[in-house]
Image (spheres, helix red, strand yellow):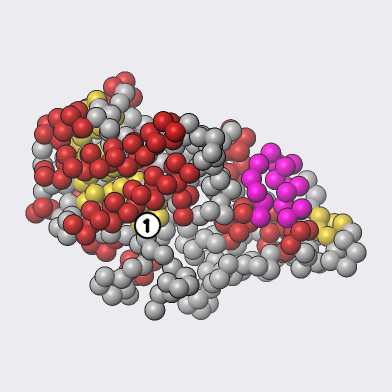
Amino acid sequence: MASTTVSPDNNTTVPATTTSTPTVDAVDKTDKPRTRVCDLPQELYDIIYAHVFTVPQFTVITIKNDYKPPPVLQVSHATRRHLLLRYCLLNKFSVQPEDFATWYLAQPPKWRTEMDVRDSRRDGMGERSSKTVVVTGASGGIGRATAVSFAKAGAAKIALLGRRQEALEKTRKAVEAVDSKTQTSLHICDSTDADAIQRAANTVGSWDVLVLNAGVSPEGTSVQSADLTAWWSVFETNVKGTVITAQAFLPHADLQSSPSIISVNAALPFTPNFPVWAGKSAYNGSKIALASVMHHLAQENPSINVVSVHPGIVDTDMMSIIEEQKKYMKSVGLLDEPELPADFFVWLSTFEAGKACSGKFVFANWDVEELMEKLKKEEEGSEVLTLKLDGWPFISS
């Protein structure tokens, strides 16, 4: 598809310079600019990078010298939106183009799409560790990948909690395929069933890592038209179910091992400009409440590292987008594999990472070295990466 630009003088369409797909370099010549590492179709570069002049703070676009942008570098807000809309429609990617562009440009310098779990094995779990790991929502997706990653890292025991026995059996086989010496146990239970969760906790006994992954993400609907029972059930699972699990397992934590509780959350509730935010009041509200609960849990249990994590935009059964959209999102680097958060969780379970991130909300996509460097500069009790109300009249000092 040929790319086009629009002249700001007469609003006429002119052809853009055609080149090979450029690459945005992760070049940061000062401490302030932020740049995104990604590969985009040429047409999208022509529209977004050449025409964006309302770029988020601390964002800079650095493009290789062989990229020649279209001759017109500034167009009106309406024209840029029109170009983006046409591109998204032609590619059957039904999002709000302005939001898409803004979100895409706002990423940090090093945006991971994969992580090497062997780094975590070396620093945390160790060869043939004695650690016991508990994973809720282990029937598939992120939960299954998490179990496999901890098996790779050398966990001695992995307890798998979920509602579907057949799916949990598949997770067990996936773990055994990685390391046959890792002991697995299956616990068929719903996270909202307090008695079943308590039985599982009593059976598992002492644990070192608890990954709270069970959750639901319903179809979007407005608050006015939502079925109240269905709407509230999202809170029952995402918030109450997680609290039930935490209450049952907390007494069994091995406090000598610097245990970790890792809560799978999401960035969506905190990004109202993201295309699919509208209509997700139950999901967004429940995840914000969950993040607050985890912050309380961290403060109440200083011997346990409690971290909330955005796992990335992961291709799981919970995603409510069509296959064509998934293909497009993958092609432009917007879709992550479940192994990314799974390996990130292993890293979080290490002593240094857990202590640094406890009480925080972090992204699995973030570069771990950059994250640790940032957190080391923060004073004890810093509110960075925590829930708070900021801006007038609550301006941070």
Numbered range of the magenta stretch: 81-98
Three-letter residue code for mark 1 = Val
**Magenta segment, principal secondary structure?**
helix
Secondary structure of residue under mark 1: strand
Q: Eyeballing the image, is 7 above or below 119?
A: below
Magenta-colored stretch includes residue 91 = yes
Taking the image as drawn, is residue 367 in sight? yes
Q: Residue furthest top?
A: 166
- Residue 33, percent from left and from top: 53, 73
Image quadrant containing the C terminus: bottom left
Q: Which residue is depicted at the point 31% across and 47% down?
A: 263
Magenta-colored stretch includes residue 164 = no
Which of the two residues, 169 or 10, is positioned nearer the viewer here?
10
Taking the image as drawn, is residue 337 in sight? no
Which of the two residues, 202 or 294, is positioned nearer the viewer here?
294
- Residue 318, percent from left and from top: 45, 35
Q: How many marks are shown on the rendered structure?
A: 1
How dense is the environment of label 1, judged by Cα within 10 Å: few (below 14), some, or many (20 and up)? many
Where is mark 1, residue-wise?
362
92 sits left or right of 75 in the view: left
Q: Which residue is depicted at the point 34% across and 52% down?
A: 291
Q: Which residue is depicted at the point 59% across and 33% down?
A: 322
Q: Where, by quadrant of the figure, is residue 155 drawn?
A: top left
Q: Eyeballing the image, is 146 above or below 370?
A: above
Q: Which residue is depicted at the point 40% across and 55% down?
A: 363
160 sits left or right of 64 in the view: left
- Residue 240, percent from left and from top: 29, 40
